[in-house]
Image: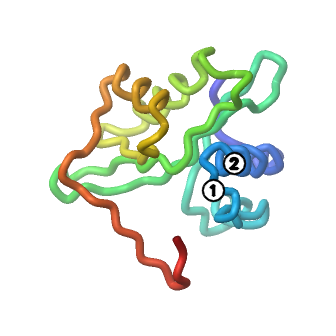
């Protein structure tokens, strides 16, 4: 089952983010707290959304954290998928596909995301869905504090 995240899901969302950071060997850069998530997901000035995948036993087994974007070329809103993560024991059971289908159904514009170059399983999966890499573009990052 796919549903919007609820405030009571915050501990699981925090755990999923930390698991993703560990999977990507980026735990040293993961400083997001449950308080941060509460503020951006459920606070009065919420700026992002989270959709969760729930197993038959009611446990949260994956999530898609996303926010709206806008394309001036298309003249319409889209979605930036910041995190897509399904716990290893629950992969290949349709959870990622259901999360992505939910996002696709939320916009007539683009759904965009990044994938690490070494994550061939994810690349293969996304390409089977019909997603394609954006050749000719380089992502830039500008932060207040120098970070890797």
How far from the left and from the top, in percent, is residue 130?
Answer: 30, 24
**Residue 26 position (above or below residue 90):** below
Report, in whole angstroms, how far the alpha carbon at label 1 lies from the one at label 2: 6 Å
Give the residue number, with chain letter if any, for mark 2: 22
Q: Which residue is mark 1?
A: 26
Mark carried by residue 129:
none
Tell which of 94 and 52 is nearer to you. 94
Instruction: Tell me what residue is drawn at x 63 percent, y 27 percent.
Output: 2
- What is the secondary structure assignment of the residue under circle 2? helix
Residue 32, image quadrant: bottom right
Residue at 60%, 23% (x, y): give it. Answer: 95
Quadrant containing the N terminus is top right
Tell me: 148 left or right of 60.
Answer: left
User: In the visual, does 117 lie left or right of 83?
Assistant: left
**Residue 56 % position (x, y):** 78, 16
Q: Position of residue 136 (x, y in %)?
A: 18, 52
Query: Are the residues tagged 1 and 2 within 8 Å (C-beta)?
Result: yes
Taking 10 as reference, is 95 left or right? left
Q: Is residue 30 above or below residue 106?
A: below
Front residue (pair 85, 23):
23
The residue lying at 51 percent from left, 84 percent from top is 144
Which residue extends farthest bottom?
144
């Amino acid at each position: 089952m796919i549903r919007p995240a609820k405030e009571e899901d915050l501990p699981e969302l925090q755990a999923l983010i930390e698991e993703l950071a560990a999977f990507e060997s980026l735990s040293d850069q993961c400083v997001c707290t449950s308080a941060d998530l509460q503020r951006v997901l459920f606070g009065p000035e919420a700026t992002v959304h989270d959709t969760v995948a729930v197993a038959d036993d009611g446990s949260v087994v994956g999530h898609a954290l996303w926010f709206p974007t806008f394309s001036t070329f298309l003249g319409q809103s889209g979605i930036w998928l910041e995190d897509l993560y399904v716990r290893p024991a629950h992969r290949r059971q349709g959870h990622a596909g259901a999360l992505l289908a939910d996002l696709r159904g939320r916009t007539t514009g683009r759904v965009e995301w990044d994938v690490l170059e070494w994550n061939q399983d994810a690349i293969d999966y996304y390409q089977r869905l019909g997603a394609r890499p954006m050749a000719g573009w380089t992502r830039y990052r500008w932060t207040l504090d120098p970070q890797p």
